Image: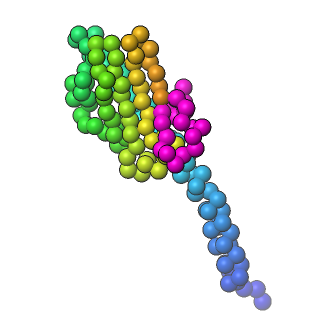
Amino acid sequence: MSTAGFSLIETLLSLALMGLLMGVALPSFEITWLQSRRQDAHNSLLQLHLKQLQYRGLHAQYASSLADLGWPSSSSAMGHYVLSLDQVSAQTYALHAHVTGLQSRDMACSTMSLQVTENARVQKTSSSDHSASPDQNEPGHCWPW
C-alpha cells in the first residue's frame, strides 16, 4: 500500500531549507535593487546636464533652478532621489541627487553629484552615509562610468 504526499518531517525540512535559501538570497537581491535604482539618479543628472547645456546656449549663464530647465519637480524621473541645483554662475553649476524613500537604504551612495567647473570640466562625485565604509567615499564610486 502506497500513500501519496509528504510526511510532516519532509514538509518541515523543505520549509526550513526554503527559509535558509531565502535568508541567503534576499540580502544580495536587495543590494542589486539598490544598485540598479542608482541608474535613476544617473539618468536624471545627465538629462539635467544636457538641459543646462541647451539653456546656456541661449542665455548668459546656466539656469539657476530646476523649473528654468523645464524639470517638473524636485524628484528624479523615477522618484528615488531628490534633486537640487546650486553653485550656479556663467561657467559653473552643481547638480545633486539625494536618496529618498526605499533608496535611503543605499548608504554607500547617499548623494551623487555632477559638477561643471570653470574650465568646463565635468566631475561626477558621490558620497556615502557616515555608517558606510570610508573606502567607498572616493569620488565617483557610485558612477558606473
Between 38 and 18, the residue placed more toward the observer is: 38
138 magenta-colored = yes
Between 13 and 115, the residue placed more toward the observer is: 115
Residue 60, horizontal then vertical, whole percent: 23, 10
Residue 97, horizontal then vertical, whole percent: 38, 35
125 magenta-colored = no
Between 139 and 56, the residue placed more toward the observer is: 139
Q: Is 12 rendered above or below residue 43? A: below
For residue 94, side relative to residue 108 (left or right): left
Q: Quadrant of residue 134?
A: top right
Residue 135, horizontal then vertical, whole percent: 60, 37
Q: Is 101 rendered above or below residue 125? A: below
Magenta stretch? 126-145
Between 129 and 70, the residue placed more toward the observer is: 129
Q: By what rule are the colours in the image chosen?
A: rainbow
State the quadrant of the C terminus: top right
Residue visible at 40% across and 43% down?
99
Residue visible at 41% across and 35% down?
41
Q: Is 64 rendered above or below residue 129? A: above
Residue visible at 31% across and 23% down?
87
